[in-house]
Amino acid sequence: MAYDSFKTLTSSAVPLPIENVDTDQIIPARFLKATERIGFGDNLFRDWRYNQDGSPKSEFVLNNSTYSGKILVGGHNFGSGSSREHAAWAIYDYGFRCVVSSFFADIFRGNCLNIGVLPVQVSETFLAQIFEAIEKNPNTSLTIDLLNQKISLDAMGISESFDINKYKKENMLNGYDDIDYLSNIKSEIQQFASNTPL
Amino acid sequence: MKQTLFDKVWDSHIVRSIEHGPDVLFIDRHMVHEVTSPVAFLGIKNRELPVLYPERTFATADHNTPTINQHLPVADPLSRNQLKALEQNANAHGISYWGLGHEKNGIVHVVGPEYGITQPGATIVCGDSHTSTHGAFGAIAFGIGTSEVEMVLATQCIMQPKPKKMRITINGSLNEGVTPKDVALFIISKLTTSGATGYFVEYAGEVFQQLSMEGRMTVCNLSIEMGARGGMIAPDEKTFEYIKDREFTPKGADWEKAMDYWKTLHTDEGASFDKEFIYHGSEIDPMITFGTNPGMGMSITKAIPKASELEGGEATYAKSLEYMGYKEGELMVGKPIDYVFIGSCTNGRIEDFRAFASVVKGKKRADNVTAWLVPGSHKVLNAIKEEGLLEIFEEAQFELREPGCSACLAMNDDKIPAGKYAVSTSNRNFEGRQGPGSRTLLASPLVAAAAAITGKITDPRTLINH
């Protein structure tokens, strides 16, 4: 098992209603110097979260104890820019298991799926409803049901279905990763390679 | 079945397709650098897996490296440790390693083409989103995450669904003072930073045919900035001329055989795309960005758009302009700047330094400007010296540094201070990209040169030496 399996999650959520959140904001390049995957959560949204002297910026949502939970809700085009998987690691290490947005950048979405963070893409309308519900009640809970591919705003009794390809869904439900799959077809790969000159 | 260039290359690398899932895609060549690879090497160690085909992986150090005094030990212990890890991992697995000080060292997307690792029809990946650069040769090249780096090391494959196909055609030719960088910033300003997400782009039309290989690399490099997985251009005589006789390209009979295949790599007449955009070269002016993503660019002569003229996202737009210290409706020309950066995998090739030299020749750097000229590789550095550009730079009071990614992402000491404005030939103007609080204006080497000479944002067409 390569990472924690993901079946259902019910949690309050942290809202970040900003568009085009790029991976340089999620984790700035100067914090990518580690050679092991540890401690990245401390620097999640580093420059939005802390002043240059290291003191917290009180207005930023991660410094506001009103908001908490295992779900991060972001604006359109979340995770654009650099391919750094460190962005997904930082989100995971901080304690999030799911990111909700109306649109994700490709590489970021793939990185999340590869480490066991579920990216859930919803309509602009549903995203606006989520932000509104959290604004009214920061403790409002969302439920993400991967098996049925459904996200619900529990108190309001509204839900929406979301897409995920069948292969990745199986992986997430069981905590498998791609190397588990690829290792099982090694001879097929070697056969292919022998016909593919360098 | 009519096929696109992208179909031909992708389909020929499918090991197997999973129903309602991704394709298992064979990767011909894999490039690694020090930042996104150590955890991948640790992963295969923990799984007790070897590198399946070490001869297909190439390692170079670039993101963390200093751009002065490269002969000395790297001062920052964390950077030094990461560079050491890459060297140890490469040596342990029999991977060729071009570390700091090596004659072939340089930015991964500059050295790959220089040594012929990049070839038409190949699949090329690297843990870096600007891997799209290599698409200039008719390769499928794209950035991957560290989990995928681990996959490629262990199995030489990745698992991804086939992207949709987009073609961007630009007919006609470019006006004077308009460079490949302007073409890319123009396209991104039209499509936005998410306009090509989910697509692989083919660039077609006379403008791209006329571009040099360096220019094509600049355009393909920036494909990711509109969200595309990658971008590619059909190989032609220019492509073959560029790669012939490079170290890793086929020789003799193998070359002839490869050429037979490469000549088939073009989109068939009548093949279909999921989305198409068509522009004319004459629409494009020298460009500059005014906000905090690469889609926020415009003709250098224009005023910053008003939020009311844009679709949605007014709060995000206001946040962006506030960060930049700009107001809607202001003209960009004449605004003071503090730093100029020439370099990166976008514009760190010899042609970029030639363009910069064409403007600064016989002039002097403005006193208020700090300029960093950072070649993309040792090969570029040597060419700058051999072509006499170094004398031009020195006479104009510019200092040439040593190769690396440098101020593009400011992982080393080359950081733009908080609040300062940098006209940069790099690829991203995100908040803090070039150092905490830094303000980046993306532009071509010509616009950067004009800013370096005048100390403010200047239309380079007013300065071009005839």
Image (cartoon, coloured by chain):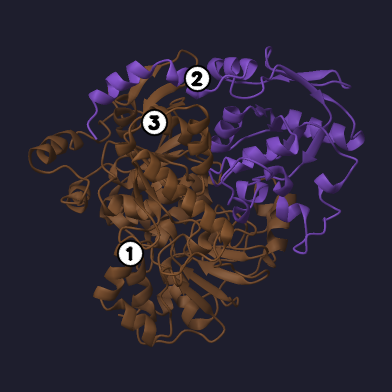
Disc 3: which residue:
B273
Q: Nearer the viewer, mark 2 or mark 3?
A: 2
Question: Residue at 92% across / 33% down in the picture?
Answer: A137
Circles 2 and 3, Cβ within 8 Å, touching? The answer is: no
Q: Earlier in the sequence, mark 3 or mark 1?
A: 3
Q: Which chain is brown?
A: B
Q: CA distance from mark 3 to mark 1?
A: 40 Å
The answer, for residue A194, to whether it is visible in the render is: yes
Residue B265 occupies quadrant: top left
Question: Residue at 60% across / 62% down in the picture?
Answer: B290
Disc 2: which residue:
A180
SS for tag 3? loop
Q: Nearer the viewer, mark 3 or mark 1?
A: 1
Instruction: Tell me where residue A10 appears, x and y as whole percent.
Output: 81, 22
Instruction: Tell me where residue A75 appears, x and y as whole percent.
Output: 70, 40
SS for tag 1? helix
Q: Residue furthest left?
A: B253
Q: Is residue B213 left or right of residue B40?
A: left
Vertically, is B458 above or below B207?
A: below
Evaluate whether label 3 is on the same chain as label 1. Answer: yes
Q: Which chain is purple?
A: A
Kind of residue indicated by mark 3 = Phe
